[in-house]
Amino acid sequence: MIADPKSRLAEWFKPGTVKPLATDKGERFVPSLALPSKPDDLAKLVGECEALNLSELKELAIDVLQKYQRTEEQHYVTSYVQIALRDLEAWHFEKEQGKQNSVATKKKAAGTPQEENYPQQPTYDEWDNM
């Protein structure tokens, strides 16, 4: 089912078409960078998503449109750039937090030298076999 053959989304939904989305290592993407910037294009996208029953994409587009309404800037390009920069900074922050957490986990996994000197306790399965 294709809502509008002239739509750019129409080629995405042709049978047998595979369009990979660029994601980070956590399989996430920055929504404001994946959506069109113009309010008119966003509104069209919302309508197409409604017709194609793509609720998740529709919600992302509506969220960006609502952010446009809440900003004090008069021109959508300025608002779009501000939103994209905020989302990108949040993504970088989450990425850095993930790196710091993985470093802390690796340090804990390495253990202290004192722990390495103690004999390892047998598991319950080994006790059953004794």
Image (tube, grey):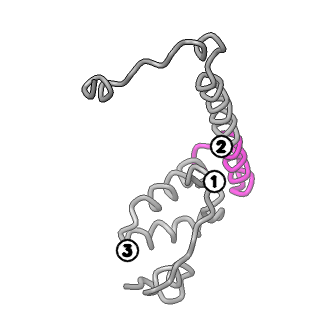
- Asked which quadrant contains residue 70, the reply is top right
Identity of the amino acid at label 2?
Trp
- Asked which quadrant contains residue 23, the reply is bottom right
Report if residue 46 lies within the magenta region: no
Instruction: Give x and y (percent) for residue 13.
Output: 46, 81
Question: Which residue does the image show at 68% across and 56% down from the upper left?
Answer: 76
Determine whether the residue tagged by mark 2 lies in a helix, strand or loop. Answer: helix
Determine whether the residue tagged by mark 1 lies in a helix, strand or loop. Answer: loop
Q: Nearer the viewer, mark 2 or mark 1?
A: 1
Of mark 2 and mark 1, the one earlier in the sequence is: 1
Question: Which residue does the image show at 73% across and 52% down from the upper left?
Answer: 81
Mark 1 and mark 2 in contact (Cβ < 8 Å)?
A: yes
Q: Which residues are magenta?
A: 68-91
Q: Which residue is mark 2?
A: 91
Q: Please tell me the numbered disc located at residue 51.
A: 3
Question: Which residue does the image show at 65% across and 43% down from the upper left?
Answer: 91
Instruction: Give x and y (percent) for residue 84.
Output: 69, 50
Q: Nearer the viewer, mark 2 or mark 3?
A: 2
Q: Which residue is mark 1?
A: 24
Question: Which residue does the image show at 25% across and 26% down from the upper left?
Answer: 128
Identity of the amino acid at label 1?
Asp
Above or below: residue 110 compared with residue 14? above
